[in-house]
Image (tube, rainbow, N blue to C red):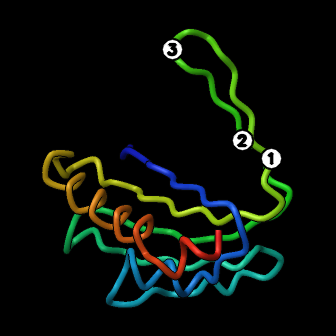
Amino acid sequence: MGIEYRLTLAGNIPLEDLASLVAPHGVEESTLPGYPRLLTADLGEEIGYTVTVSAGSSGYFDAEDDDGTQWEWEPDTYTNIIFDLRKNNPPEDVVPTMVSAVARVLTNPLLVKMV
């Protein structure tokens, strides 16, 4: 089993805009009927992870910090970017590349204006 990291962004962000930042060589679109739109790229051989980009609505996210304070967030629309790191790749080799992809998303001026 690998390690999964998720970045959730509020707002109705075009999936292709995000996908081009985290998987610049292209993504595949899921064609499963009855499921929300889903873009994926298997970058395992190149950089050690698979990335999935999907959108949703009426979200609910919660977490608890170290001192026990509960945090809740309910965005009307949101987009998830999920990085699934392979178990056979050492995290120290893969994480810097993933963090660079996240930085491209969070610093993209077009996306910052949308959110």
Task: Name the kind of residue labelled 2 in the image.
Answer: Phe
For marks 3 and 2, give the CA distance: 17 Å
Q: Which residue is mark 3?
A: 66
Q: Which residue is mark 2?
A: 61
Instruction: Where is residue 3? Give x, y as percent.
Output: 38, 44
Q: Residue 91 got which mark?
A: none
Mark 2 vs mark 1: in front: 1
Q: Are marks 1 and 3 in contact (CB under 8 Å)?
A: no
Task: Name the kind of residue labelled 1 in the image.
Answer: Glu
Query: 89 or 80: nearer the eye?
Result: 80
Q: Which residue is mark 1?
A: 74
Specify the quadrant of the image occupied by residue 39.
Answer: bottom right
Q: What is the quadrant of the C terminus in the image?
A: bottom right
Residue drawn at x 49%, y 77% is 40
Query: Which element is circle 2 on?
Result: strand
| 65 left or right, relative to 11 | left
Specify the quadrant of the image occupied by residue 57.
Answer: bottom right
**Mark 3 or 2 closer to N-term?**
2
Q: What is the quadrant of the N terminus in the image?
A: top left
| 112 left or right, relative to 42 | right
Residue drawn at x 20%, y 55% is 96
Q: Are marks 2 and 1 in contact (CB under 8 Å)?
A: yes
Specify the quadrant of the image occupied by residue 11.
Answer: bottom right
Number of other residues with Cα within 10 Å of mark 1, as a class: few under 14, some 14 to 19, many 20 or more? few
In this rendering, the count of numbered labels is: 3
Farthest top residue in view: 67
Query: Which element is circle 1 on?
Result: loop
* Image: 87 above or below 78: above
Task: Name the kind of residue labelled 3 in the image.
Answer: Asp
Residue drawn at x 78%, y 65% is 77
